[in-house]
Amino acid sequence: MVAFGKKLKERQIEEWQEYYINYKLMKKKVKQYANQIETGVLDHRNVLKDFSRMLDNQIEKIVLFLLEQQGMLASRIAELNEQRDTLQDHPDISKITELREAYREVGRDLLKLLFFVEMNAIGFRKILKKFDKRFGYKFTDYYVKTRANHPYSQLQQVFKHVGLGAVVGAISRNLSDLQERQGSYLSIYDQPALPLQDPVVDSLKSAVDRLTHSTNLLNFLGQHALIMQEELPTAEEHADDQRYHFMSLLLNLANTFLYMINTYIIVPTADDYAMSLGAAATVCGIIIGSMAVAQIFSSVYFSAWSNKSYFRPLVFSSVVLFLGNIMYALAYDLNSISVLLIGRLFCGFGSARAVNRRYISDCVPLKIRMQASAGFVSASALGMACGPALAGLLQTKFKIYKITFNQETLPGWVMSIAWLIYLIWLWISFREPALETEVNYAPQESKAEGNDKLEKGLVQPLLLTAAENQQDIVEDQELDESEEAPEESCRPANSIGSAYRLLTPSVKVQLLIYFMLKYAMEILLSESSVITTYYFSWSTSTVSIFLACLGLTVLPVNIVVGSYVSNMFEDRQILMASEIMVLLGILFSFNVIIPYSVPQYVCSGLIMFVSAEVLEGVNLSLLSRVMSSRLSRGTYNGGLLSTEAGTIARVIADGTITLGGFLGQSKLLNVTLLPSLLICVASIIATCYTYNSLY
């Protein structure tokens, strides 16, 4: 979030003010370092040494205070435990109630301490990121690696809240023991899945979840979905719990799953369908791409519609997809390629992926939002694999009255039935979440008190004078021209143009990478049936198996990268390596000199597809971190921009296949791969230039 220094001053706990990270001082030092290096007063080595010492001192100040507060909390719990032991011998209901409230009071103070740790951890990440923008990414890597794993590490206390978990456990256990169990003598350790119904414990768990967030794998998959989240903690997270409904989330994920099946179920048979209607096999590019053309527009109006409702857009999506698939199936008996294309356009106009993303971002509680984001990615991957596999099973032919059911039309009939069932399920089970009250983005001198008494002590701001506010804004603008005034930092972009102006050069490069990988993947998938039929005489079933196998690699690849590879290498190293592997996959796919063989096609396609999947995950992970916070909400958000970039890439790729068909099927492979090669080379050059300029 921009203007973090002002936000830190507003949200810090007043009596602990002197123990927070001195973000304002460190921000000024970064600016001074830049000026001193330019004038030759200091060199990079002295800057790194001085800045490291300053960070060490700040961390030590925070950690010593943290340990002092932990000791005080531990002493209070020990005193309460003595009272608890006395009450076990002589139970007294009134004293048990008082004791329970005393434990809750310790819990409230612990919650303040967790909030303190979190604000400081965010502050350190922010200042390191700001330093890296000025001097290169190497410093953060050096600092974290040298401090985090050292036997005397103080950094662990801030970023891994060592010791606080034990205090949380002590409060939870004692409150659980004091809770009425209807004669049961089991503890929380005997039944870890049994929830403890206490608001203080729930708040503590939410605070700990914010600090630890989730596993590397869930973070990796969740960022793959590009569902951006606010980094600063707020006191209003319980509102999400009221809007959240598990069945509604499941219906959103089901919509994603079915839509991906709908997209890829026609790929193995699109060329045969085109020829049965009197068109060339390469018209399959237009048939497949027409859905993506419509999606360019549907993404915008669905994103805008989700500002007011989630249920109505999903109903509209289901109805339009039902009609589109009916038209796609009937085109065979009507002998009309126009009806076929209109049916696919209808399917594209029903793309509600913007609504699916928005529901997770707006209505799913923070504690499970990363799991829901990972579920979104998993549903997409499974749908991508199931689509071609299902097409391979629909190898039959029969007639009912005058309607033909065969491998070309059955995908349309099957999906229309699926969308009809989904529509009924949606109508019965979906619960429209309550609309959020409109946020006033005008700057304020102070905040209103929180509704929840537990949070009041955590979010009381210090009163700031107008001069101080203005000074912070001026300093932020001087340090980084890309930062905005606080009142602007909360306002979402109101048009594609304003959203584009928020993109930094590095974000634009990453969108170019996303465009490139989507283009290369679409070329591989959409022309697979035509290419394999021409070179290898593959049947529809064989093509379906090949495409399904490619789709099934998505989740295992993301598991390996998210759990292991991302822990061993930096993201930019994985980014560059996967770009090079995509390039090699494209190069190996060309048909030059030697006869084209099945092993060459399968291996090169597998290298290209898997590398593109790795690249997509890492690229979107980086994108979610560097994109403006203004693009985390509103109609024109980061998810919409990435979707538009990928959809436009698919449209151009499918158009390239159809245009390449005019040169003959013998030249189709090389003609369609050439643009992929050029775009891939351009993205590698842009990546090298962008990251080298940051050092």
Image (cartoon, grey):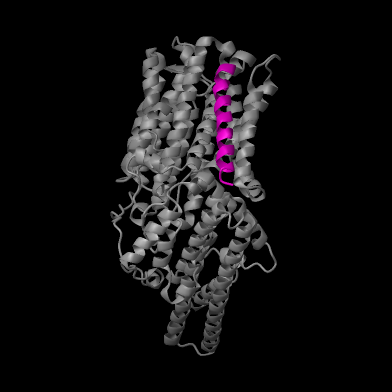
Which quadrant would residue 62 be assigned to in this image?
bottom right
User: Per the image, is 387 magenta?
Assistant: no
Tell me, yes or no, if residue 372 can be seen here. yes
Does 506 sit above or below residue 89?
above
Query: Which of the 4 image quarters holds residue 496?
Result: top left
Above or below, 195 against 38 in this view is below
Residue 523, x across and y down, in percent:
54, 24
Q: Is residue 402 visible?
A: no
Q: Which quadrant of the view contains residue 533?
A: top right
In the image, residue 382 above or below residue 526: below
> Magenta residues: mostly which secondary structure?
helix
Query: Does the magenta segment cover residue 671?
Result: yes
Image location (x, y in percent) of residue 666: 59, 11
Q: Is residue 526 left or right of residue 608?
A: left
Magenta stretch: give its range.
670-695
Task: Please tell me which residue lies in front, 203 or 91.
Answer: 203
**The one of 349 and 249 positioned closer to us in this rendering:** 349
Q: How many marks?
A: 0
Q: Residue at left 40%, top 31%?
A: 295
- Image quadrant holding the N terminus, namely bottom left
Q: Position of residue 299 (x, y in %)?
A: 38, 36
